[in-house]
Image (cartoon, grey):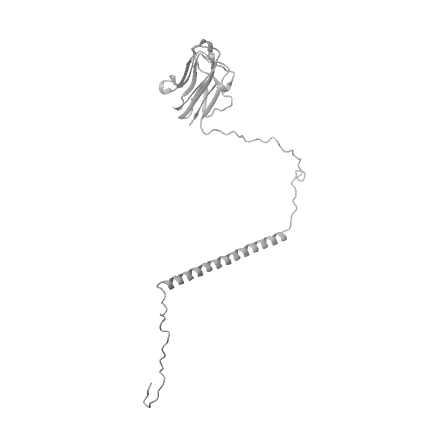
Amino acid sequence: MDMADGRKYPSVFVVDGCTGFPPPLPPKPGQTRKRNQRNRLIQNILLVLVCLALFGLFVEGIFIYSLHNRANHNDTTPSRPVEPKTEARKGGHNKQPDDKKTKQSTFLHPSKPLAHLSAGDTKPKEDGIMKWKDVQNSTYELEYKDGKLIVQKEGFYYVYSKLSYTADGMSFTQMVQWSTSRYLNKPITLLTYHRRNSKSGQNGTLRSSYLGGIFHLFKGDAVFVEVKDGTSIRLHDAAENVFGMFML
């Protein structure tokens, strides 16, 4: 630079020779905010972990302290000898233990009325009504009288009957009858089994009949089994001749 006095002075402005490279790009919008959020999340996680560690140490200290106090208490408590309480010390007589204790009944009552009967020792008479006996004492909330089961509670019942007989006569008929005051106690057939013996050579052949069904019965109704030609019934096996009912 030329001055008034004619002298040349160097320029104070220096120009960088690397002008061919572009300047650095500014950060993308939102990148700084995401970085700050990620750092804040990491800090929060570390803070939670530190708090959990401190809490665990606190609980462990309380547990150790309680064990220490319990051990000291057991060491300082004097042990007392156990004195047996005998009748001799009290001045009484020694009593023998009573082995015959009353045992509570373990019989479980059914939740609903039921009955299961087996055939008696006699075959049906002129009226044809089968007589039964309660072998296993299984009648519950049902009354048995003169071969009939009398309903004590209204509801739907499954009624069944099975008989064993020989094909000696012309035919065999088994019926489950229903007697109710709603129909003047006249027998009404609920179930029936009938079989004819067509061949004479079948005499002595052992057969069985089974009847079963669901019926709506009322209190006071009677259900019974009626047989025609009851002389052919075989009473040798109680399991082959049964009659019963149970509420559904």
Q: Residue furthest bottom?
A: 5
Residue sitting at 43 percent across and 17 percent down?
225
Question: Residue 173 appears in which quarter of the rendering?
Answer: top left
In this rendering, the answer to whether 119 lies above or below 70 is above
Query: Where does the image place residue 136, in percent across and percent down from the top left?
Result: 51, 23
112 or 14, nearer to the observer: 14
32 or 225, nearer to the observer: 32
Residue sitting at 41 percent across and 20 percent down?
222
Quarter holding the N terminus is bottom left
Query: Where does the image place residue 183, in percent across and percent down from the top left?
Result: 36, 19
179 or 216, nearer to the observer: 216
Question: Residue 82 appears in which quarter of the rendering?
Answer: top right
Query: Where does the image place residue 85, in percent across and percent down from the top left?
Result: 65, 40
Task: Report the side of 14 relative to 93 (left or right).
Answer: left
Q: Residue furthest top?
A: 200
Residue sitting at 55 percent across and 54 percent down?
63
Query: Where does the image place residue 14, in percent across and percent down from the top left?
Result: 36, 79
Quarter holding the C terminus is top left
Q: Residue furthest left?
A: 4
In this rendering, the answer to whether 243 lies above or below 102 is above
Residue 182 makes an appearance in the image? yes
Residue 217 makes an appearance in the image? no
